[in-house]
Amino acid sequence: MPSAKITHLTDRALIRVAGDDAHHFLQNLVTADIEKTDENGACAGALLTPQGKILFDFLIYKTADGYLLDAPLETAPDLLKRLTFYRLRAKVDLEYMDEDLGVIAVWNGTAVFETALLAVTDPRVPALGERVVGKVRSLLAENTAEAASLEDYDFHRIALGVPEGLKDFDYSDIFPHDADLDQLGGVSFTKGCYVGQEVVSRVHHRGTSRKRFVLVESSDKLPEKGTPVTSGGKSIGELGSSTGQIGLALVRLDKAAQAKDNGTPLQCGVAKVQVRIPDWASFSWPERSTAN
């Protein structure tokens, strides 16, 4: 059995959402069902534009006095500003957590942390491992798991086919279904209204999601993010993050299925590629006749 790996996710930041109205504040704002977050301890989620596109994506953790949002460090200040904008008169406290507090990822095994503030199995795909929040220096010092890099963790994430904002797609650019967020437990279709809910619900109930993130594999090194995935010289999608010969790409499912059925090779830059749906996903390639 491989030993557990551990790394500090230095590209993540934590935002505290607490106060009497914290639950209702998030429930009426983000895509996730906060009732399930309370039950399970964590969930994926997003804040959308009124047009239903992803403005921010994050993980949500239940704590004793509220919630923590585990978000990309690069856009965390903007997320905090946007949450403050929506707060209005709600009894909600919004703040960054202490700089010493961070997120640790553990995968390929388990680890025990005596000083952790919280530890949860990643709510998107259990195989991603654990997310542990606490004082980073203490967490790393007390654990004997194999030290790994952020790049190692990204390889693990990409190999499982899990997209993330900024790394795989730009904000305000795609819908939750495009980012597989509905497949990863980050979208509720039963809890009622939230920002952008009408558009997301319409896509879901009409089954009109035509683009999805899928795995891309090649015997060659994949090119940089944003490189088109092409079939017969025509673009059917775009590469997201990659590491070596495996990556994620947002593709038109019907066009990719048509290429597979016709035996038409797919390219990403000069690399010949194959695409496949992640094992955890419940969507499938559409029937051949749907491509146009």
Image: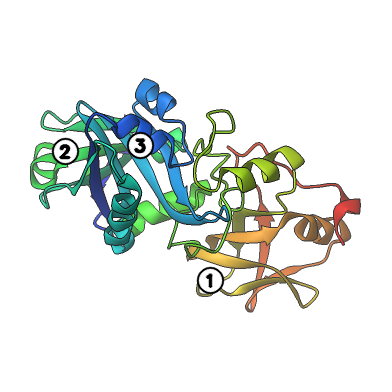
Q: Is residue 207 visible?
A: yes
Pick the quarter of the image with the N terminus: top left
Residue 170 in the image: state x and y as whole percent.
Answer: 48, 65
User: Which quadrant of the figure has residue 189?
Assistant: top right
Horizontal side of residue 158 vs 141, given as left or right: right
Q: Are marks 2 and 1 in contact (CB under 8 Å)?
A: no
Residue under label 2, please give it: 144
Q: Nearer the viewer, mark 3 or mark 1?
A: 3
Left or right: 263 with respect to 250? right
Q: Nearer the viewer, residue 84 or 159?
A: 84
Q: Nearer the viewer, residue 30 or 104?
A: 30
Residue lying at 50% horizontally and 48% vertically, measured from the top left:
162
Q: Residues within 10 Å of mark 1 (few under 14, many from 20)?
A: some
Residue depicted at x 22% and y 35%: 18
Q: Nearer the viewer, residue 149 or 186?
A: 186
Among the two numbered marks 2 and 1 on one chain, the one whose residue lies closer to the N terminus: 2
Whole-number angstrom distance, CA of label 3 to CA of label 1: 45 Å
Q: Earlier in the sequence, mark 2 or mark 3?
A: 3
Quadrant for the C terminus in the image = bottom right
**To which residue does mark 1 refer?**
221
Q: Earlier in the sequence, mark 3 or mark 1?
A: 3
- Measured as percent of width and height from the top left, residue 262 is found at 88, 60
Q: Which residue matches tag 3?
A: 25
Element class at badge 1: loop
Label 2 to label 1: alpha-carbon separation = 33 Å
Residues at marks 2 and 3, CA–CA distance in whole angstroms: 39 Å
Disc 3 packing (10 Å; few <14; some 14–19; many ≥20): many
At mark 3, the secondary structure is helix
110 shown above or below 105 = above
